[in-house]
Image (tube, grey):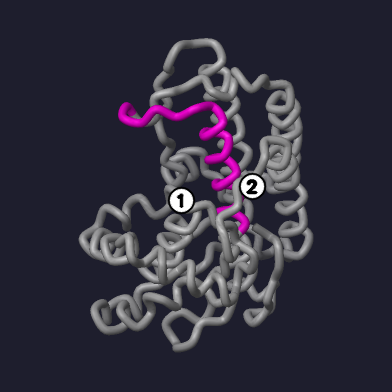
Amino acid sequence: MHSRFDRFRASSLGQQLEAMIVQSERYIEFAALSRVGVAAIAAVTDEIAQKFPEVEQDTTARQFCGAMVAEVMRRHGHEVVQPRGRVGGSWFSYGAVFSPSPIKLAWPDIIRELASMPDKLSACVTRTPEKLWRRRPSGTGFALVEHACHLRDLDAIFAARIEAILSAHLPDIDSVDGTALADSRNYVEQDLHAAARAFAKARRRLCTSLGKLTPEALTRCCLRDGIRRMTLEELVRELLDHDRTHCLELDELGAALHVIPNGRESQGAT
């Protein structure tokens, strides 16, 4: 899940919502809805309305619920096929629709997906008027310029992580607080076009490097946050999940800024 929710996730309400959404039986419900093309979050909307009435007026809490459902589905290998499917009721008008079955991309397909992200960001920049580049959505979320800066800087961090795994035995890899990074580097005042160009250049370089890795290299491990051993391949798949999270957030931002029609049934921008 995107680090923008770290603070909310640690709150009492965040912990209660997470405990409800990650129950093992929930995945069965989410998957069943996915097989019939319905947004997965529809499985929990009634329970949220009944047990958590305060969420109705809390935009961040509702965004967190959607992100938590997405995390559950991605853990099980599902991909977003429609970022904004309709949901009945007034609390969650839209939600992500996931693939009917889990999908595990082959390594070349992962690289191709990663290579496509700069074009997706560029499309968002093109459709958004310059006067809206620094405007944040309601709740918890980045402005467009902050997305571009974050993607640029995270690519540099991931490149350093990959180099560490290739050159050292079980290096420590710590998570990054993207919200704190955005504040400390004042993303909102940076140049959007420069950030997008730097991201595109870095991503091309990263994908070229990934394409040269041997199967043996992909099995090398790091120690994530001091507790979890991850292979290099798992780390790169995490980067792809990070891209997909930003695609969802960019879609939400576009709807909030009214540069994407609220009722649009967009495809594939994940």
Q: Earlier in the sequence, mark 1 or mark 2?
A: 1
Q: Which residue is mark 1?
A: 75
Q: Foreground residue, 2 or 253?
A: 2
Label 1: element kind = helix
Is residue 104 in the magenta section? no
Instruction: State the residue lying farthest toward the left.
Output: 12
Q: Is residue 12 visible?
A: yes
Mark 1 or mark 2, whichever is nearer to me: 1
| 180 sits left or right of 98 in the view | left
Classified by dominant secondary structure, the portion drawn in magenta counts as helix
- The residue that appears at 61% across and 34% down in the rendered structure is 155
As rendered, which of 163 and 145 lies closer to the eye?
Answer: 163
- Mark 2 — residue? 148
Residue placed at 77% from the left, 50% from the top?
119
Residue at image x 35%, y 73%?
58
Type of amino acid at the residue the image marks with label 2:
Ala
Query: Considering the numbered disc 2 on the image, is that residue within a helix, a strand or a loop?
Result: helix
Residue 110, horizontal then vertical, whole percent = 67, 40
Give, as a single range, the part of the protein colored magenta. 226-247
Q: How many marks?
A: 2
Quarter holding residue 72: bottom left
| Foreground pick, 185 / 258 | 258
Q: Residue at x 54, y 70 (%)?
A: 34
Q: Position of residue 254 (x, y in %)?
A: 64, 68
Residue 261 falls left or right of residue 2: right
- Residue 55 horizontal/vertical position (percent): 32, 76
Question: Residue 106: x and y, percent?
Answer: 67, 40
